[in-house]
Image (spheres, grey):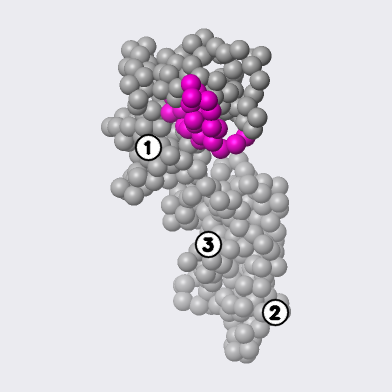
């Protein structure tokens, strides 16, 4: 998952984001290592004697890709430039020798393991080796696998497992491309998917009135032990000792409790205390999954109290960030959570 270790904020909701083929390894491709190398083995094209072959280094690399499914080392390319330049070898005979080698069988097996996540039967390896001898290729084999019913089903299952949504046609096509031409294994595709999660694709364990003393464990236990990632807290402008009073907090902080009744208070007294706990969790576990914090603005017409979340009309008119105002709530969230805060505008 991009590292969703940031926090989303609005008036009502906040989110805490959170073995090479060496020269001579092919018995059919033995050569005399004492032969001198060409004058310029790094040149793209080597002009040779009449009995030799004119070949580009890219053509040699392509033989490795097609038959062994990998890029050759520089030394391997240089050796085959020499072999082809000295005569006795052509690209076709080189390719045929590679396709008949045990390393081609290993490459075929690797495609099964990487794309379909299973070990192939001997007859399956035999079949695909014969296909490559007949000038099919390892890349074409990968492409055929991801487009097969088996490969498509596994890509779609990977999407469902990681994203928890049924893969669309476009999702499936993306997975096929990532594996066929992007070089990812099926496991690598799942890891890549985890970095592509959108906020609207995340499923979270949620907890209502998550602060409440008589119902729930402490905030850190909720996050670490129980794996809760969606917390709901109630905000009130007045303390539980004087719910309907007019002596609201003189700064931009709020009280957190359900009602002015026994055991319905919070495990932390003020919003700033709860945010400090979230900041501590974020500092201790910076790679945590996205955490959503719902802030319910209590009071007024909720039937349980007469206080309101933003009680000071003058401060509201002045949009003061130092009082109980929407701007004050923004300022408090930024002050306590810093760069971990992600605003709704950043999700659009």
Residues packed near mark 3 inside 10 Å, few (<14), some (14 to 19) or many (20 plus)? many
Find residue 6 and report its image quarter. Answer: bottom right
Disc sitting over residue 322 in the figure:
2
Q: Could you tell me which residue is drawn at 34 percent across and 17 percent down?
A: 130
Examine the structure image and report whether residue 165 is included in the region drawn in magenta. no
Disc sitting over residue 155 in the figure:
1
Where residue 276 appears, x then y in whole percent?
A: 70, 59
Q: Could you tell me which residue is drawn at 56 percent across and 37 percent down?
A: 44
Where residue 138 appears, x then y in whole percent?
A: 41, 28
Q: What element carries label 1?
A: helix
Examine the structure image and report whether residue 65 is included in the region drawn in magenta. yes
Residues drawn in magenta: 42-70
Where residue 327 appears, x then y in whole percent?
A: 62, 78
The answer to whether residue 109 is seen in the rendering is no
Judged by depth in the image, the label closer to the viewer, 2 or 1, is 1
Residues packed near mark 2 inside 10 Å, few (<14), some (14 to 19) or many (20 plus)? some
301 versus 146 height, above or below: below
The answer to whether residue 185 is seen in the rendering is yes
Where residue 194 appears, x then y in whole percent?
A: 50, 44
**Which of 340/11 is in front?**
340
């Amino acid at each position: 998952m991009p590292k969703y270790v940031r926090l989303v904020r609005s008036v009502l909701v906040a989110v805490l984001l959170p073995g090479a083929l060496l020269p001579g390894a092919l018995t059919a491709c033995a050569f005399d290592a004492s032969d001198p190398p060409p004058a310029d083995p790094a040149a793209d094209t080597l002009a040779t004697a009449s009995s030799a072959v004119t070949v580009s280094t890219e053509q040699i690399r392509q033989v490795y890709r097609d038959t062994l499914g990998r890029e050759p080392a520089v030394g391997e390319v240089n050796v085959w430039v020499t072999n082809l330049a000295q005569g006795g070898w052509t690209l076709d005979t080189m390719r045929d020798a590679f396709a008949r080698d045990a390393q081609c069988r290993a490459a075929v097996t690797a495609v099964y393991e990487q794309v379909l996540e299973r070990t192939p039967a001997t007859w399956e390896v035999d079949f695909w080796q014969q296909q490559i001898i007949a000038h099919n290729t390892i890349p074409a084999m990968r492409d055929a696998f991801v487009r097969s019913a088996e490969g498509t089903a596994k890509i779609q299952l990977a999407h469902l497992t990681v994203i928890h949504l049924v893969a669309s046609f476009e999702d499936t096509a993306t997975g096929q491309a990532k594996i066929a031409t992007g070089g990812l294994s099926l496991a690598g595709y799942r890891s890549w998917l985890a970095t592509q999660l959108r906020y609207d694709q995340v499923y979270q364990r949620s907890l209502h009135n998550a602060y409440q003393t008589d119902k729930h464990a402490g905030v850190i236990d909720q996050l670490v032990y129980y794996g809760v990632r969606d917390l709901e807290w109630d905000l009130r402008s007045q303390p539980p000792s004087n719910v309907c009073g007019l002596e609201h907090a003189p700064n931009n902080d709020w009280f957190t409790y359900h009602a002015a009744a026994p055991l319905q208070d919070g495990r932390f007294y003020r919003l700033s205390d709860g945010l400090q706990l979230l900041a501590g969790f974020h500092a201790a576990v910076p790679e945590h999954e996205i955490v959503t914090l719902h802030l319910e603005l209590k009071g007024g017409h909720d039937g349980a109290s007469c206080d309101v979340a933003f009680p000071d009309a003058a401060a509201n008119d002045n949009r003061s960030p130092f009082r109980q105002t929407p701007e004050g709530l923004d300022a408090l969230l930024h002050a306590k959570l810093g760069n971990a805060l992600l605003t709704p505008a950043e999700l659009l």
